[in-house]
Each structure stands twice: as C-alpha cells, then as structure tokens.
Image (cartoon, grey):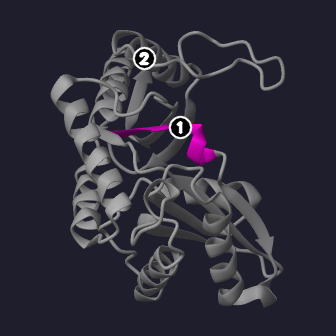
Amino acid sequence: MIREVDVSLISDTVMRLCIEANRELPRDICEALETARGQETWPTALSILDGLIENHTLAKQCSAPICQDTGMACVFVELGQDVHLNGSLREAVDEGVRRGYGEGYLRKSVVADPIRRVNTGDNTPAMLHIELVPGSKIRITVAPKGFGSENMSRIEMLRPSDGLDGVRRFVLGAVEKAGPNPCPPVVVGVGIGGSFDQCALLAKKALLRPIDRRHPDPFYAALETELLDSINRLGIGPQGFGGRTTALGLCIETLPTHIAGLPCAVNISCHVTRRKTAVL
C-alpha cells in the first residue's frame, strides 16, 4: 500500500524541529556536561562548565536559543519507499526552515552566494540529505550547525599504507589544530571510507548518533573510546582554558572504499550539538 503524505506536514514538522533543536540540548549532551563537571578539578574549567550548564538550562526554561549562532539548518530525511509525497520535498523543507527561523526568532545566517555573500534573510536553503529506506515512514532530523565549529572540520585522503595509525594521527591532529576555536568541550564526528564526498557526509552523520551509544562493531567501538581518551589528554579543556574534558564524545561511521584509498573526515561540533528528530 502506498501512503499519501501532504508535504505541508513536513513543513510543519521541520518548523517545530528547528525551534526545539535550538532551544533544548539532547539528553546525552546534557548528561555528558554533567559528567564532565563531576570529574573536573581545575577551577577555571569548573567555572566554565557551570556556566555552560546554566546556559542550556535557562535556554530550555525561557524558550530561548542556547547559542546566538542558531546555525545552518542541516536536515536529514529518511523517506520510506512506500510513501508518495503530494508536493515538493525540497520546497516543503525550506518552508519549514523559513517559518521555524522566523517564528522562533532565530538568527538567519545563510548567504545566497559564497562569494557575493548576500543574506537570504530566512536561513534557507537548508542543507538537505535524503535517503530512501524501506517502509512507509518518514524520519526527519534537524541538526542546526554553527560555523565556529564547522570551520574546524577537516578531510584527508589518506593512503592505505597510512593504516590505523594514520587515522589516529589525523583525527587527533584535527582536534589539536582546532584548539579553543570550536568552543570546547566538543563532539567529534569521524567518517572513514567511501569516496571524498561520502566521507565528509559520514562525519556529519556521526554527530547524529547519541554520544553514549557506541559503534555496533567492537573494533570501532574500542577505537572511539581510544580516540576520545587521547583527545581529552590534550588538555585543551572547556573553552581552551585547560582541564580534563576537551571532547564530550566521539562517534565513527564507516563505508566500504576503493583499494587505493583511505578517506578520513573529521566534523567537529561545539558543546551545543543540536539535533531533533520526528517520525511521521
């Protein structure tokens, strides 16, 4: 049976998710901040973590944005192959972003052209990623991404001979070079494999996974833990002032790749790692 869905439902959902994602941190991020606070001994870092926790608590209570950079709207749609949409998905998503950023009083940060840089005035177009999946459901995730952290992201076309040690060096080096710029403590998304373009998308998708959920493959689960420990030993700390927690979490996503390649990408997110999901 084909399920008919009017795209107005998608617009309404995206609008709501844009507002909610910018006002309320996910559970796993809140818990990670509390854990970092409980483990910290450096007074400056303690003070910063207290401020971050107070900030996201007040944002939720006051229905205000957690951060002034309300981000570029990255929208991930898993579209069931048994769904027929009555209208344009792209137009519906952009309409939802337009309404969400207007009605939510969220900062509009998108420019229409990367060189001439005239603001579109409504935070559209969204960065839309669509995946066709079995079934008759539509899963929508809105993950607003600020560019203080996005600008610190990196991709490297490693050689197969670089191996696991090359991946380790690249990921650690990317976070170390970023230093205090992405507003640590950060969340690190790592993509390994695929092609140049798919690897970067893998790293972005890795940020959608709750940071307390390990990779299902024990090899990569162990690598996630190892890399996170190595990053936190860098001592960059909250906002770059030193301390035990430079990263709250690290998630890896992988794809098969060519025999001649080992692409690796790092997508860094600040402590305001926002994502909100709805299933229609």
**What residue is drawn where x is 52% and y is 66%?**
236
Q: Position of residue 257 (x, y in %)?
A: 70, 73
Q: Position of residue 229 (x, y in %)?
A: 44, 81
Screen quadrant of the N terminus? top left
Disc 1 on helix, strand or loop? loop
Q: State which mark lies toward you, 2 or 1.
A: 1
Predominant SS along the magenta part: strand
Disc 2 on helix, strand or loop? helix
Residue furthest front as drawn: 43
**What residue is drawn where x is 68% and y is 19%?**
111
Q: Quadrant of residue 116?
A: top right
As displayed, is residue 60 above or below residue 96?
below
As displayed, is residue 139 above or below residue 251?
above
Range drawn in magenta: 138-150
Q: Kindly identify which numbered label has been placed on residue 101.
A: 2
Q: Is residue 42 magenta?
A: no
Image check: 73 left or right of 9?
right
Q: Kindly identify which numbered label has been placed on residue 146.
A: 1
As displayed, is residue 76 above or below residue 11?
below
Label located before the other in sequence (2 or 1): 2
Judging depth in this view, the residue of 234 and 117 nearest the camera is 234
